[in-house]
């Protein structure tokens, strides 16, 4: 990833408290610590966004791990996919979405999209006074911890794999690890067509993964938010000796740690025991930039509850 | 298709010569005859646009049928796919692209995209003083002529099939014909992955087409600009008794007729015989809204010549 750094001149123009210290690429993935926060309400919701439905797998993990947190989800269905768009375009789109989510009063933001995490996280985090995390860093850390033979595979969209974002972050953590990427552009359409357990998906996955098996990776990152839905098939093809890393789960864990550290965990999630009576599920909100019906159908198929309140908004007005 | 009609009040506000007579839906597909033209240069290029690479199959048919015509192609790769976008969004995008193409001095415009033809052709044609044609009307006319048993199948993206645009135009031509649509959302990704002759594509196509075979259609419209690349496989599965209609070819024919009728055919294409020495191929221009490299690779794989001059432009500035 190419990190946008302010030039010395630009930096001089910032007031002292807003100056961002020079950091190495790895540190840039925990940028929420850089600025004082002005919004600190533990009862506020968490904002989650993606180019479409894929980020719902991240929302699902957050719902499982932090069942009392309210989520405001935005899927940019009018402008997907982000994978083929330029860095500048993705940053512009992400800024609009962040303005929308801030407008909804979120206390933290999860960029649940690999492309937007890769292109826009650093910029968005620098401009925000609330915690902002992406889906790449947590997965990369887990992969580095998991590998025994120092050979890690990454599957993702063409955009994610060509950007080599996981390779760069993993090398920032441990330069000795070899990272092998494999673009799998057919997997998202297959998942969105509902062919999760199907001979065609098996065949396509076998072809895609053959190359990585030939590289003897012992750890494989599911580097696209749709792929956790194919986890069991990937596990069968790769074999039990290969550890699968699901960045959606790792990102939910990272969110929990950060909210806890910042005193921003919803009070309902603190100090409950398993014998407590569970309160009513929080009312999540779902927004899209186009055609809410398609989104709702897919969301209802992968989330535990019904998603009946999806609203379309004009994101370009933000 | 829901046709946007001006209300009586709005119509009254227009000066006499700009009033558009009320037309039935079928006539709306030849709207280029409505207005006097101010740009009438036979040597000017023809503008062709699509949401991405699919419209190149239409460009290819135009190159074959009208080898002396220069083409200015625009692929809206930054904002694809159009299939999931609303009517208003697609009209806004199409207007920007038409302004860009007019800026390049085109003498006619081919909307080589089913979604944009469905949503924006009527509006664009009403606003233009040069001929504008879409990909739907010519294919529908051919299907109506071809069917013997009055049962026509249409395959396309989810957007095209859900809009039932081919059904509406075909019914406008002959209300007795039954039209059966089948959305095939995996075909575009399979084509773009290059799996034109592959067991997986065969399997997916067989599943999609099974339903239409069960309806005993004798004519099948390839209602998506990518599908001509799968023509031989579709023909094999449907059997020789089913006529395949390729709207890309029919649209090129319609363009030839209109340019001829309007005296706008490039002089080089008029009066040549097969024994004439062919002149140098015209210099086509290719523009995209994002990531020109991907586009160029795909274009080079389906067009006869190398597409080495693809340029990225900022379409949102138009």
Image: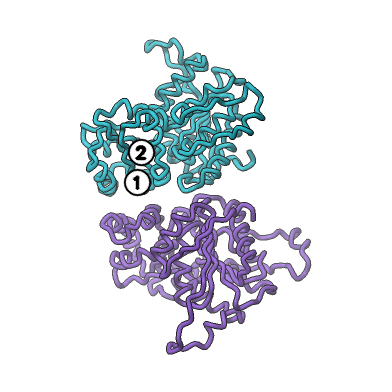
Chain colours: A cyan, B purple
Label 2 marks a residue whose chain is A
Distance, label 2 to label 1, CA atoms, is 10 Å
Res A255 seen here: yes
Please tell me which residue lies in front, B244 or B309.
Answer: B309
Q: Quadrant of residue B301?
A: bottom left
Please tell me which residue lies in front, A69 or B21.
Answer: A69
Q: Are marks 2 and 1 on the same chain?
A: yes
A54 w.r.t. B289: above or below: above
Please tell me which residue lies in front, B81 or B301.
Answer: B301
A64 w.r.t. B244: above or below: above
| Label 2 residue SS | helix
Image location of residue A260, percent across then percent down: 47, 16
How crowded pointer 1 is (Cα within 10 Å; few <14, some 14-19, many 20+) is rated as some
Task: Find residue A53 and name its label.
Answer: none
User: In the rendered structure, are the residues bearing label 2 and label 1 in contact, judged by CB atoms less than 8 Å apart?
Assistant: yes
Of badges 2 and 1, the one in the foreground is 1
Task: Find residue A184 and name its label.
Answer: 1
Q: Badge 2 is on which residue?
A: A227
Q: Quadrant of residue A315?
A: top right
Residue at image position (47%, 25%) is: A30
Image location of residue B175, percent across then percent down: 50, 68
Label 1 marks a residue whose chain is A
B115 w.r.t. B21: above or below: above
Image location of residue A246, percent across then percent down: 35, 31
Image quadrant in which the C terminus of chain A is located = top right
How crowded pointer 2 is (Cα within 10 Å; few <14, some 14-19, many 20+) is rated as many
| Label 1 residue SS | loop
A6 w.r.t. A202: above or below: above
Residue at image position (24%, 31%) is: A149
Between disc 2 and disc 1, whose residue precedes? 1
Image location of residue B16, percent across then percent down: 77, 69
């Amino acid at each position: 990833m190419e990190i946008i750094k302010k030039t010395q001149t630009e930096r001089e123009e910032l007031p002292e408290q807003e100056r961002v210290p020079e950091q190495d690429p790895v540190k840039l993935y925990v940028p929420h610590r850089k600025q004082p926060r002005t919004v600190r309400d533990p009862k506020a919701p968490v904002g989650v966004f993606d180019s479409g439905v894929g980020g719902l797998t991240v929302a699902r993990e957050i719902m499982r791990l932090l069942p009392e947190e309210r989520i405001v989800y935005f899927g940019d269905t009018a402008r997907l996919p982000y994978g083929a768009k330029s860095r500048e375009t993705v940053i512009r789109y992400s800024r609009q979405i962040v303005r929308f989510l801030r407008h909804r009063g979120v206390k933290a933001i999860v960029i649940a999209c690999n492309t937007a995490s890769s292109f826009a996280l650093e910029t968005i985090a620098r401009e925000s006074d609330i915690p902002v995390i992406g889906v790449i860093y947590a997965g990369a850390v887990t992969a580095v911890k998991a590998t025994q033979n120092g050979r890690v595979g990454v599957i993702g969209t063409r955009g994610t794999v060509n950007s080599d974002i996981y390779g760069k972050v993993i090398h920032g953590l441990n330069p000795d690890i070899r990272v092998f990427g494999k673009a799998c552009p057919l997997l998202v359409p297959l998942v969105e067509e509902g062919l999760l357990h199907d001979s065609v998906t098996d065949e396509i996955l076998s072809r895609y993964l053959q190359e990585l098996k030939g590289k003897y990776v012992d750890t494989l990152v599911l580097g696209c938010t749709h792929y956790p839905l194919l986890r069991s098939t990937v596990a069968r093809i790769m074999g039990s000796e290969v550890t699968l890393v699901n960045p959606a789960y790792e990102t939910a864990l990272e969110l929990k740690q950060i909210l806890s550290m910042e005193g921003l965990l919803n009070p309902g999630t603190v100090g409950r025991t398993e014998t407590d009576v569970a309160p009513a599920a929080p009312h999540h909100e779902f927004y899209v930039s186009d055609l809410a019906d398609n989104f709702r159908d897919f969301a209802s198929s992968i989330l535990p509850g019904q998603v009946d309140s999806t609203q379309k908004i004009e994101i370009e007005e933000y």
